[in-house]
Amino acid sequence: MQIKFFNPGLGYSKMKDEIIVEIDRVLSAGDLVLRKDMEDFEKSLAEYVGVKYAVALNSCTDALYLALRALKIGKGDEVLVPSRTFVASAQVIVQAGATPVFYDIDGKMEYSDNIKAIIPVHIEGEFDKHFADILKLAEEKGWHIIEDSAQALGATFNGHKAGSFGTIACFSFYPAKILGAYGDAGALVTDDKDIYEWVKDCRNHFKDSNAEWGINSRMDNLQAAVLNVKFKYLDQILKIRKNIADMYTEGLRGIMGLELPPHTEGRVWQDYIVRTEQRDLLYNFLKEQGIETLKNNYPFPVPKLPQAQSYEDETLRLPCNENLTDEEILEIISKIKEFFKQ
Ligand SMILES: Cc1ncc(COP(=O)(O)O)c(C=O)c1O
């Protein structure tokens, strides 16, 4: 059996009837840039997250970058960010002219008075493990929180959704994300009207105010139309992903040398990641069996902190998306057991 890690073509074929109608409508009307579908998506996202405003952008990377700029963070400023994250969370700090200050998986932080913000990352669908402490610390120090929620749409903490805690939060709708477009897409959410207005103008070259230099980071209206269709199925998608995680955990529990991800309250399943010192051997074995997995490496141009590095060296992402069949998941479980001779 051949099992792909991610199969967007299959996902499309399942929703084709609904999607094709929307694509045809948008293209026939010529509604390509800054149109109603994009505005509808912004409204749906803000309502879903539980915040006042959302701005649809080209990517989560741009959303994080614009978040820093909107907060006037730049040269001479420092921003805390976990070392265990995708490169974009840290890259944007450098892009904005500020300096990233990393914390490792244990959450121990060293910081100076130059810290202006912290970017906790809700990685793999789970809130930053130190989020309760971060909330306290940020309040005490007067830091802004910018939640990197790229991987955590729908996750909750104390009953509130990811994206509803920070001054600003950022989401990704990259195709492999929980809510995936057919190309790049992202968004920034906030309760702050001034930030909202600033980002909305900045994403379109500051054409409204000519106040300063802007960028082009508009979400395509066509992508928004696709996302509006998929949004209706978000709860279903989250449920299917949770069932997959439950099946994996049930099937793989108790294997010596294989660490399974925690089923933390409120988490969502952007990824199902297992940890083993035999990661590369397991990866190769599954590949020979026709099962595509991903090594969980997110390299930086600077060294990762030690715990983040060993986590990345030892972890493997198993296929985890709403298009997998039970038969495929059982096959993956059975091959992993075969590898560990269980
Ligand atoms: C944690 C995290 N932050 C930011 C990003 C950047 O998202 P985008 O690809 O939409 O720019 C990603 C994308 O994978 C991510 O996983």
Image: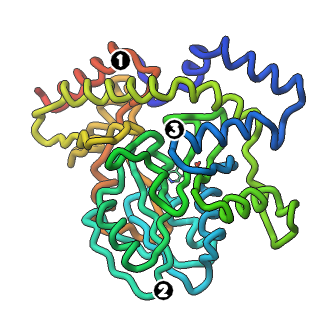
Q: Which labelled disc corresponds to residue 265?
A: none
- Residue 68 pos. (x, y %): 60, 69
User: Of callouts 3 and 2, which one flags the residue occurring earlier in the amino acid sequence?
Assistant: 2
- Residue 24 pos. (x, y %): 80, 19
- Give amino acid for label 2: Asn
User: Of callouts 2 and 1, which one flags the residue occurring earlier in the amino acid sequence?
Assistant: 2
Residue position for label 3: 177
Secondary structure of the residue carrying tag 2 is: loop
Residue position for label 1: 328
Depth order, front residue of 73/86: 73
Query: On the rendered image, what quadrant is the C terminus found in?
Result: top left
| Mark 3 C-beta closer than 8 Å to ligand 1 | yes
Separation of disc 2 and disc 1 at Cα?
A: 50 Å
Tell me the quarter of the picture where residue 335 sits.
top left
Depth order, front residue of 317/23: 23
Q: Residue at x 24, y 45 (%)?
A: 275
Secondary structure of the residue carrying tag 1 is: helix
Q: Which labelled disc corresponds to residue 114?
A: 2
Indicate left or right for 110 with 11 as reference.
left
- Give amino acid for label 1: Glu
Q: Is residue 132 above or below residue 272?
A: below
Mark 3: few/some/many CA within 10 Å (<14, 14-19, 20+): some
Q: Residue at x 86, y 66 (%)?
A: 209
Indicate left or right for 242 with 233 as reference.
left
Q: Is residue 95 visible?
A: no
Separation of disc 3 and disc 1 at Cα?
A: 20 Å
User: Of callouts 3 and 1, which one flags the residue occurring earlier in the amino acid sequence?
Assistant: 3
Query: On the rendered image, what quadrant is the N terminus found in?
Result: top left
Whether tag 3 and tag 2 are in contact, CB under 8 A, the answer is: no
